[in-house]
Amino acid sequence: MRLSDDEKAMRDGAHGAAKARAMDLLVRYGEALGAERLVETNNVAGAFNASTPSIAHLAEEGFDKVYSELNLDSDETVEIPHMAVPTCQLITGIDNRNWQTQGVDEKLAELQRRSEQYLGARGVNMMATCTPYQVGNVPVKGEHCAWMESSAVIYCNSVLGARTNVEGKESTGAAALTGRIPYWGYHLPENRFATHLVDIDIDIDEMADWGVLGYFIGFAVGEDIPALNGIRRQPNLVKLKHFGAAAASSGGVEMYHIPGVTPEAASMEQAFGPNRDKQVIRFGAKERRETYERLQCATERKVDFIMLGCPHNSIEQMALIAQLLEGRRIHPDVALWVHTPHAIRQMAERSGYNAIIEAAGGVVMSDTCPAISRKLPPGVRVVATDSAKQAHYLPAIAKVEGWFGSLADCVETAVSGEWQGAG
């Protein structure tokens, strides 16, 4: 790889041992990818917190040890300085307010709090969400980022027009200390054109429709780039958030185009650029029905647990959940967890939404989700969710049955105790 003089200086230790380790990691990583150089980044979103039992033992030697081993791939413990560029912590495993409800060990909850203090002192912003773009981290079109989290990456590339690959703990840890990331993949303009045309001949409007469409497209295109034709209604943040999360779950989609909606595709011609040999995929009523049925992983209609907020709920979604639950009570045999970033939880609290959800018997959680924490209420056998992503992952992760449907389906199920969707 070609390195600038500043990059060579970091690699050679002129700016300290931590940056030398970080630059060594990035060079090895870039060479493995076939990158010719590094690119500057001023936006890193990664996973730095030591909040899982499998890595808690590292913290016994100090949090420098945790960062060195997990974020720099270094057996040697180096002193970690302040981050070189704006950096945020993505979703964690523990809700600092509701850790007891999650069933988290008190020592682990305290470890997370101490880890956050360590990281905050070094410039890591504790956004603690899979949707950093909902709480202040909003890169601009063309900006080079180093982000983890599949649903965040696809939103960053597609909706915001910024540039990132799906990074890992090590590459984001190194990028935060150096302000560099390998220049390859979706950082290169020529790699951002569509490869598949998806012809849609039914109306796509509700959030659940967008989830089903994303889930279908992920299976259909794998890791390629779809361009959607036939979208008749302007989608909002919530719909695009759920679409991208579903496409990144059933496939490996990191970018898509919707002409007239996403910033790099004013037209279908612009979406495909020089790619003329495109594959065409059809999505109609038959495909929608088959994909919806594919998302149903349950046979028992009695439901124990409702999970809302994957990706994390927006303030508009929190308002709607409160509206649907106002004056009602959740069935005594059902647990309802509503997940949102803690910044949005604070807004929802001031707006009165949390009080309504909690009066109905629900719990408002932040910073985590069951797929990340591996924590569900005791004895759960059947789950219902409005998230195609969660419906895809949770049955395998938690060995439960799962229903997928609309938010209204899930709220009615929470009140009745039995699945109220079409499945």
Image (cartoon, rainbow, N blue to C red):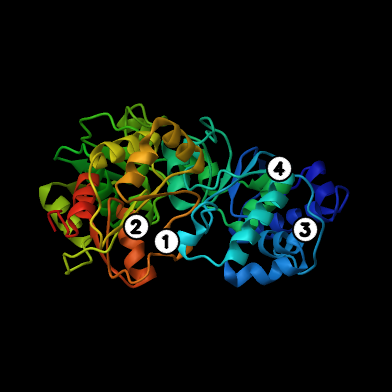
Which of labels 3 and 1 is toward the front?
1
Q: Position of residue 218 (x, y in %)?
A: 32, 54
Q: Amino acid at mark 4?
A: Gly
Q: Amino acid at mark 3?
A: Arg
Q: Are marks 1 and 2 in contact (CB under 8 Å)?
A: yes
Look at mark 1 in the image and give the residue it sits on.
371
Residue 284, numbered label: none
Q: Is tag 3's residue or tag 1's residue first in the polypeptide sequence?
A: 3
Q: Secondary structure at mark 4?
A: loop
* Rendered residue at 23%/51% (across/down): 410
Q: Is tag 1's residue or tag 4's residue first in the polypeptide sequence?
A: 4
Q: Is tag 3's residue or tag 4's residue first in the polypeptide sequence?
A: 3
Q: Is residue 13 left or right of residue 98?
A: right
Look at mark 2 in the image and give the residue it sits on.
390
Q: Is residue 77 left or right of residue 321?
A: right
* Rendered residue at 64%/54% (across/down): 113
Q: CA distance from mark 3 to mark 2?
A: 36 Å
Nearest the camera: 307 or 259?
A: 307
* Rendered residue at 74%/42% (across/down): 84
